[in-house]
């Protein structure tokens, strides 16, 4: 258990440092990427390209290994359907991301910057996540 927590903490630190070094903790940079008709900033495209490359390598490795080093099995997605909840969630995420310039990972990492808007966004995000779970539990 300690090894798993240590690995999770180390990967979280690496992820946060990567977001910080790439400038993704700055909502204006993300919004600049989404502003294709104005002062477009392609930085996010390169960050996403790097992330997808690493993820593809990780998935290829996961297919060859019998199990991960610190768990009994890989937790890979099995649902391949594109349904209304997926599309609705993606749309809601995209709208929030475009308006705020933040998504959950960078928002949590941006807490270290001390920027006041982050301290409004993160609690609102957590309330939204909790509200989703309540609604989902009631709907079955």
Image: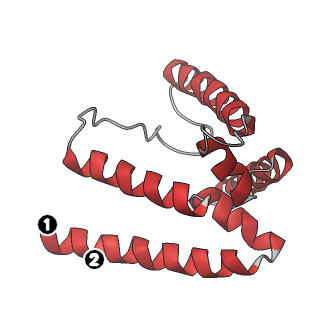
Residue 121: x and y, percent? 59, 75
The residue at the point 27 percent across, 77 percent down is: 134
Disc 2 crowd, CA 10 A, few/some/many (<14, 14-19, 20+): few
Residue 67 vs residue 125, the one in the foreground: 125
The residue at the point 23 percent across, 73 percent down is: 135
The residue at the point 32 percent across, 70 percent down is: 132
Q: Do the residues labelled 1 and 2 touch (CB within 8 Å)?
A: no
Which mark sits nearer the N-terminus, 1 or 2?
A: 2
The residue at the point 28 percent across, 32 percent down is: 80
Quadrant hosting residue 131: bottom left
Left of 130 or right of it: where is 140?
left
SS under mark 2:
helix
Left of 38 or right of it: where is 83?
left
| Outermost residue to the front | 38
The residue labelled by disc 2 is 134
The residue labelled by disc 1 is 140
Left of 17 or right of it: where is 130?
left
Residue 2: x and y, percent? 69, 61
Residue 102 vs residue 54, the one in the foreground: 102
State the quadrant of the N terminus: bottom right
C-alpha span from label 1 to label 2: 10 Å
Q: Which mark is residue 55?
A: none
Disc 1 crowd, CA 10 A, few/some/many (<14, 14-19, 20+): few
Quadrant hosting residue 95: bottom left
Q: In this view, does 47 lie above or below 113?
A: above
Residue 63: x and y, percent? 49, 21
Res. 115 visible in picture: yes
Residue 67: x and y, percent? 52, 32
State the quadrant of the C terminus: bottom left
SS under mark 1:
loop
């Amino acid at each position: 258990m300690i090894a798993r927590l240590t690995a999770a903490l180390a990967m979280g630190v690496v992820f946060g440092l990567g977001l910080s070094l790439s400038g993704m903790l700055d909502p204006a940079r993300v919004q600049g990427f989404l502003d294709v008709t104005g002062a477009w900033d392609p930085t996010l495209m390169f960050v996403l390209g790097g992330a997808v490359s690493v993820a593809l390598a990780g998935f290829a490795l996961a297919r060859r290994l019998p199990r991960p080093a610190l768990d009994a099995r890989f937790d890979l997605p099995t649902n391949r359907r594109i349904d209304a909840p997926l599309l609705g969630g993606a749309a809601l995420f995209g709208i929030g991301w475009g308006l705020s310039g933040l998504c959950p990972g960078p928002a949590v990492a941006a807490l270290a910057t001390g920027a006041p808007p982050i301290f409004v966004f993160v609690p609102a995000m957590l309330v939204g996540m909790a509200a989703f779970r309540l609604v989902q539990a009631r709907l079955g």
